[in-house]
Image (tube, rainbow, N blue to C red):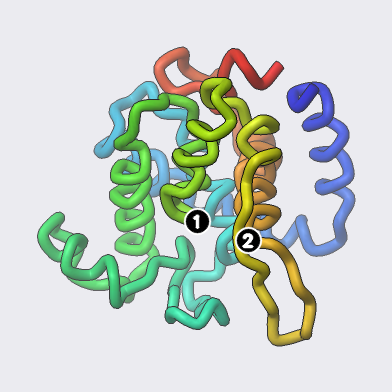
Amino acid sequence: MLRYLLPLLLAVDLLLPSKPAALQRCQQYTRQVRISHFKQFGTKYPWWYGVAQLEEESSCRSGSVSNDGVGSVGLSQVTPSFWMPHLIKAGIPDLKTARNQIRAQAYIMRDAHNHRYYELWVSYQIYNGGRLVLKEIDRAGHGPCWAAAKSVAKRKDVVFSSGQVVNAAEINYRYSKRIYQHGQKYRIGTDSDRYPFWGPYDN
């Protein structure tokens, strides 16, 4: 069902008025995203989802600072207070440049992908909301199925500065769908069997 709904969701998403500017900004980073992700994952990785992630995280604005309360910064909205010790060891000395922000993104995605499932939707949700998704997959008892895991997810509500209240599970499970949707705009090939976005349970 999920696969059949995504083209409709993508069509609606592409009609939003703010998207052309974001699309233009994001396209300038495709080469660096490809290089950085290939270094972490190899040349089979569908790097267009990395560009999609920059669009979702910051609308591809390198000077973006999040209001998430933990000081996430840059194109890929990395949290320096947590990640900088790891990034420095990986040869990424700071997050001052777009290049380093993208290198950090690929490094963190490689860390997020270090789990027993190979579907990318799981890794993107780990990047966005931590490893709770792995517990939800186990609780659903169905293998890595997006809908089944979401159905058992029980997380805290998030209160935004506007007063809007959204459950953290809704945010996290929406994130992977939006990465997939945005990714279709930057796609120039097919997804590899080694790095599929969805799995066999997501039909």
- Name the one closer to the observer, 138 or 33: 138
Give the label on residue 129, or none. 1
Local crowd size for mark 1, using a 10 Å CA cut-off: few (<14), some (14–19), many (≥20): some
Q: Mark 2 points at which residue?
A: 168
> Which numbered circle lies on residue 104?
none
In this view, 111 is above or below 155:
above
Tell me which amino acid carries mark 1. Answer: Gly
What is the quadrant of the N terminus in the image? top right
Kindly check if marks 2 and 1 are in contact, taking CB atoms under 8 A apart as contact.
yes
Residue nearest the viewer, comparing 159 with 141:
141
Q: Position of residue 98 (x, y in %)?
A: 39, 65
Residue at (66% x, 21% y) in the render: 202
Residue 70: % across, % down = 44, 79
User: In the rendering, at what x and y percent does residue 133 appear?
Assistant: 50, 43
Between disc 2 and disc 1, whose residue precedes?
Answer: 1
Q: Which amino acid does label 2 sit on?
A: Ala
Task: Work out whether 14 lies above or below 129.
Answer: above
Q: Alpha carbon of mark 2 to alpha carbon of mark 1: how far?
A: 8 Å
How packed mark 2 is, by other alpha carbons closer than 10 Å (few <14, some 14-19, many 20 or more), is: some
- Disc 1 secondary structure class: helix
